[in-house]
Image (cartoon, rainbow, N blue to C red):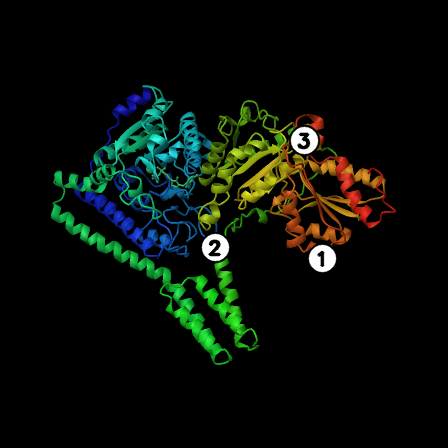
Amino acid sequence: MVAREKQEKRGIDTTLDRQELLDDYRLAYRSRQASLIGRREVLSGKAKFGIFGDGKEVAQLAMARAFRPGDFRSGYYRDQTFMFAIGAHTIQEFFAQLYAHTDVQAEPATAGRSMNAHFATRSLNPDGSWKDLTAMPNSSADVSPTASQMPRLVGLGYASKLYRELKELHHLTQFSHDGDEVAFGTIGNASCAEGMFWETVNAVGVLGIPVVLSIWDDGYGISVPNERQFPKDLSELLEGFRRKPGSERGYDLYRVRAWDYPALLEAYQRAAQVARDEHVPAIIHVVEVTQPQGHSTSGSHERYKSAERLAWEEDHDCLLRMRQWLIDEGVASPEELDQMEAEDRQTVEEIRAQAWEAYLAPIRAEVDELVALIDDLMSHSRHGDELVAIKSRLLELGAPLRQDLMVAVRDALLAMRDENIPAKGALIDWKAEQDKLSEERYGSHLYSQSAESALEVPEVKPLYSGGSETLAGFEVLNRAFDAMLARDPRVCAFGEDLGMLGGVNQAFAGLQEKYGELRVGDTGIREVTILGQAIGMAMRGLRPIAEIQYLDYLLYALQLMSDDLATLQWRTKGGQKAPVIVRTRGHRLEGIWHSGSPMAAIVHLLRGMHVLVPRDMVQAAGFYNTLLLSDEPGLVVEVLNGYRLKERLPDNIGEFTLPLGVPEVLREGKDVTIVTYGALCRIAEQAADLLGGVGIEAEIIDVRTLLPFDRHGLILESLQKTNRIVFLDEDVPGGTTAYMLQQVIEEQGGYYWLDSEPRTLSAKLHRPAYGTDGSYWSKPNVEQIFETVYELMHEVDPGAYPLFYK
Ligand SMILES: Cc1ncc(C[n+]2csc(CCOP(=O)(O)OP(=O)(O)O)c2C)c(N)n1
Ligand SMILES: [Mg+2]
């Protein structure tokens, strides 16, 4: 009841003065021009692809009026008007992105790395440290996969709850003012058919967090109409989420027409205020949205929309309707608006031209440099005619690409391949310099480049004394998590069964009682929004540990981890970060969905994250400590059958750190190197005992981290000694063993040290079968490891190592 009364009393003033109304209209009009001109630029070949926000302008003006500094957006490619209106992007930056301008000053969202209309603000200073996020409008960085912007909305909203309710976070004023910030989500109607949308709506509703979610409903998802997306109208489908009168659980729901500016202002003001004050979420279903230019530059909507629909869209164009409303209300005359529109058309054309010139100028300067080098070569080379032709081809290009310069360099060097003149050196150096610059343009920031990079965390060795306890693995982790929660109030852990139960393996036992439900909490069964919750929280300065109950279920979250989390720093060229820790457990337990080890899928999809595969719980604790001192995301895969095994507890369990990318030699040997990780470390040691019995000394190396992989070439050192190598794991054949083999044999140059062919030993192609025998015949076992190594030695010396078992 309280909430309703508060709402009743709240006077919401949505009146804007004449100037504000005209400013809004003009901004929307300029945004429309940007869309129209943008499409023209693509069709004329100056940009590669265009997707625009035409038809969505007016609702976004209203959303922007409810948005405050400190708030966050998580949205998609239709939101240019909103981004302009909150002052987070300029029209010039919009065009710079369309042209793929790689200068971060010109294109601050993605530095030319993402296609157009992928918005982002820069949360980080150039050194990677956080800015004051409460003083600026914030937008998490857009992604293209439909609805993938939804899961992180959970965390962006949830962070406000934590900042409001956890006193120990109140000093973090650069991230929040008592949790007053609202997370604004946007999504297209058709994307609401994705599972992630419903999972997000459900999670936000359960958590009771300040989220205002807008659906821009233009009736289509490219060519497919709503009837093929939903069994009923979206508002109707969402109705069950509406909160009951007097209740604080559930949503406030609004349905507004995309061209009805006063109604939109009213809805957004109300929704945002209730969300801000009471942390009650809202969904605003914006209907009668149009799409004047169709979906994107890839096609035309005349192919799939009827003549009636097209006529209806023309009649309901939000901009024309807003214009008429301004005239009807006496805000401006048609002549005044005509005048303003003419000015604005001119302005946007000028901005476009400036953006184009700014994009081309540095490339033209590089053309000049290259031409000067070619001119110089002409006076020394016997191939002057070819060089003249290369130069004129270059100068004929109206809008040269850097790729064209590289082609010219190649042609010139190819033409002069029979000459040895010093001037060639200058060209070769110039090419190398340009390659380096472009590697930075397109390849930097896959991992953190800040002082807090995980690779920079100093190693602190575990300390043991006479009094060190011996505990079960889960108890070791319990002590470690206790220490992390005690030392850093930003650390919050959550997942299925993590809170009250303390986790399915008890590593968080008792910690919810000690730290409260917000620090150690249960979630619903919703892997992708568990991850999204963590991403959004981390984007707002918190240090989430998100638990995915089993490695086999990580697949639910893998797409988002790959598309959003792993690419975040790279796709913003260091503008945003989300230092999330994902905790899970796997490799060995029972059967197909509790002993999977799909590490190659993970390693290959998560470039941009660290992937850590500790063999026991002390190792896991060390990795958690390292990650928490860094500003990067990491995945820790604990060994599922290791929680009951006894380990010695380091005296400095809360402080010791393990370096990333540094394998450990578990057992020395001179005959063969076995490279493995995780649960197989113990099994490989058992096999090495057996091998020792027949006089074969195996060296066992635990790689410990798959990403990064052996940064200092320790495995190569071993191979230089043994000249024989076996890569061993529980993934499919050709999976992570092949990855490790490529790293050692190709990257590290191990090929040159081999005396026998390199071998891989992995699990079977099929998934692990149930039961002890099922596991034995699905995964590498002691006997197989023995035989693989023994056969290598048999090849070397059949007399000494006869095949006694075949
Ligand atoms: C996962 C995924 N599937 C397909 C696409 C291709 N795609 C891009 S936009 C789009 C339609 C989205 O429609 P809607 O959500 O209604 O947004 P609108 O473009 O109409 O504003 C599709 C299918 C994609 N980007 N991601
Ligand atoms: Mg749509």
Pointer 2 or 1: first along the chain = 2
Q: In the rendered image, which residue does mark 3 sit on? A: 642
Q: Secondary structure at mark 3?
A: helix
Q: CA distance from mark 2 to mark 1?
A: 32 Å
Ligand 2: quadrant of the figure? top left
The reply to whether callout 1 and callout 3 are in contact (CB within 8 Å) is no
Label 3 to label 2: alpha-carbon separation: 42 Å
The mark closer to the camera, 2 or 1, is 1
Q: Mark 2: few, some, or many residues within 10 Å (few <14, many ≥20)? A: some
Per the image, the residue denoted by label 2 is 442
Residue at the disc numbered 1: 752
Which sits in the foreground, 741 or 123? 741
Q: Quadrant of the C terminus?
A: top right
From the viewer's perspective, is residue 53 above or below residue 3?
below
Q: Amino acid at mark 2?
A: Tyr
**Identity of the amino acid at label 3?**
Gly
